Image: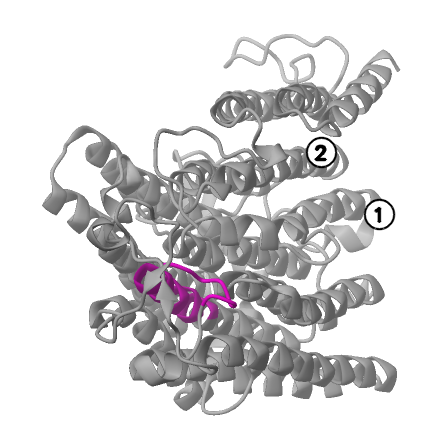
Amino acid sequence: MNAPYLPLFVALPLVAAGVASLVPGRLLHRSLLLLGPVLTGIGGVWLLSLHLTDMPVAVAQVGGFVPGIAIPFVSDTLTAVMLTVTGLTTAVVLTFAMRTGESSLPYFTPLALILTGGVNGALLTGDLFNLFVFVEVMLLPSYALLAMTGTWRRLGVGRLFLTVNLVTSAIFLIGIGLLYAAAGAVNTAALAGVAGEDPRVALGASVILLALLIKAAAVPVHGWLPRAYPGTSAAIMALFAGLHSKVALYAIYRIYTVVYDATSTYLPILLTIALASILVGSWASFGGDTIRRVLAFQMVAGVGYILLGVALSTAAALAAGLFYMVHHILTVGALILASGAIERTYGSGNLTRLANLLRRERGLAWIFGLALLSLVGFPPSSGFWGKVSLVMAATQSDAVVATVVIAVIIGASIISLLALQHLWREVFWGPPMELYRPADPLIHEGDPNRPVHLPEWVRIPRGDLVPAATMLGLSLAMFLAAGPLFDIAGEAIAGILDPTAYIEAVFP
Amino acid sequence: MIIALTIGVLVAGGTYLLMHRSLIRIAFGVGVLSHAVNLFILTAGVPVYRDEPIGDEMTASIAADPLPQAFVLTAIVITLALTVFLLAMAVIGRNDNTHRIPETGEEHDR
């Protein structure tokens, strides 16, 4: 049960960040940048194999204090799944950042490594205040990364992102204060099931959940995400899409199942939020003027699908939501990276400025098309099983809820399909593209805003598409290996639905 | 009662300042709001005066609850760092909420 190595998931990236900010050297920075997330991913796989065989929960009581006073790092199956997925996603996205040259920006390496450390900490911590601290550790480098890359709009959206997150942090802290005043503890294991016994605890935890919902960008508190994320560069957006909102959703999963004991008392509220997110996100996708803005609205819809698991809060629904979360990280990541590859070569992600890419870019069209199918939920992709399992989980609840949920899932999928068809038609079909905005100063003659004639030989370099293809390949692999993966998801959900092993591990 | 009123006034003032367009005022608003939150967390312990909770020198019955104080200390550090960053953002693009491209000394594209 005791696993004193768990803090290394946080300590090693932070130490590496310190080294990287002091020692220059391209090779060193690149290897640190890859080693951090890759080691996280490998550590996640290793923890996962450990949890699935003989040790369901691993605990490190930091500082050697007695249990209950020490701030524990806890890893169970859910944590290990998330560590694996976020670690590998970060590694793939960072290879794209190396291709685009963003990784050579000053302090990029330390910032990305601090981000990795913060994400790992937020996933591993067994204490709600520590969760707040690690979310801040994760967000601090994000503010700098957002302000560093992308177009000049990033400064405006950086203000928005920063202000929203600061106010959200204040709300989070109010929740912590309420929770501590009512329950006298902020340790997740000590809080197991108390929200059902004491409404004051339920109030405190609900304020924390509100803060997490804002960070996850669920409707009606989603407005910042589709404005902020497309303003930054594709690599950074992919990084944020895979990490930030998903860490918040992970925390919602854990808090709702453990502290609220997955009660169905709040089903109407949660269901409204989830279904509104699905509908608003899908519908708003019509309005996006750039590829990545459409994708940002699809992310809001994805948050809704993932929250459906919490709203229905049965074992099947939670497992389906977890599967959907992993699918969503991979698919949206693939699409954002592919969009980044387009922007890098053709100088714009604007739907009206791109056309007829199907003729020019076969490989890209395959990647983009399959990933869009995955996003809508067609086979052969992970999105298909994600949506099928959510629908199947919904049929287990009572008739009215099941009808509404299934109707919304199908309706929203059709809306998404139409919106994404619009995207496909604008970008991949249409008359041959004649003008583009190259990044090469020899071609655009000093004015990057001036569109120039698009020569026939211009193609996206293969290497730019490799990260997107990797993410998509993982999504397709999820389609084939859905059975075993659902077993793991079920195992992870069983661990948080019945936290006995978790509590026994934290308080031996 | 006084603490509750103080928190209320601070939250109201912070919210008012957050409603402004100017980022400097937003920064002040965040500062005021975070003070309110810090006071709020302190009241989660025992709000009346207690003795310092240091090691073995103090019996638990008259010592203050150290946990909310530790929370507040952490929160103050984080808020300070973020306020500094917010002020830096305010300096970089003085008017970028009015469609003027800020002068960052780089080429702006698309």
Q: CA distance from mark 2 to mark 1?
A: 16 Å
Q: Is residue A376 visible?
A: yes
Give the labeled residue for mark 2.
Answer: A174
Dot 2, how many residues are within 10 Å of its Cα: few (below 14), some (14-19), or many (20+)?
many
Who comes first in sequence, dot 2 or dot 1? 2
Give the labeled residue for mark 1.
Answer: A199
Secondary structure mainly formed by the magenta segment = helix
Q: Residue at x 43, y 65 (%)?
A: A336
Q: Is residue B35 magenta?
A: no
In the image, is residue A1 above or below residue B15? below
Residue range in magenta is: A332-353
Nearer the camera: disc 2 or disc 1: 2
Q: Is residue A47 visible?
A: no
A439 relative to A501 in the view: left or right: left
Q: Where is residue A470 drawn, in percent x and y?
A: 30, 74
Displayed quadrant of residue A254: bottom right
Q: Where is residue A6 drawn, in percent x and y?
A: 35, 49
- Secondary element at image label 2: helix
Tally of numbered discs: 2
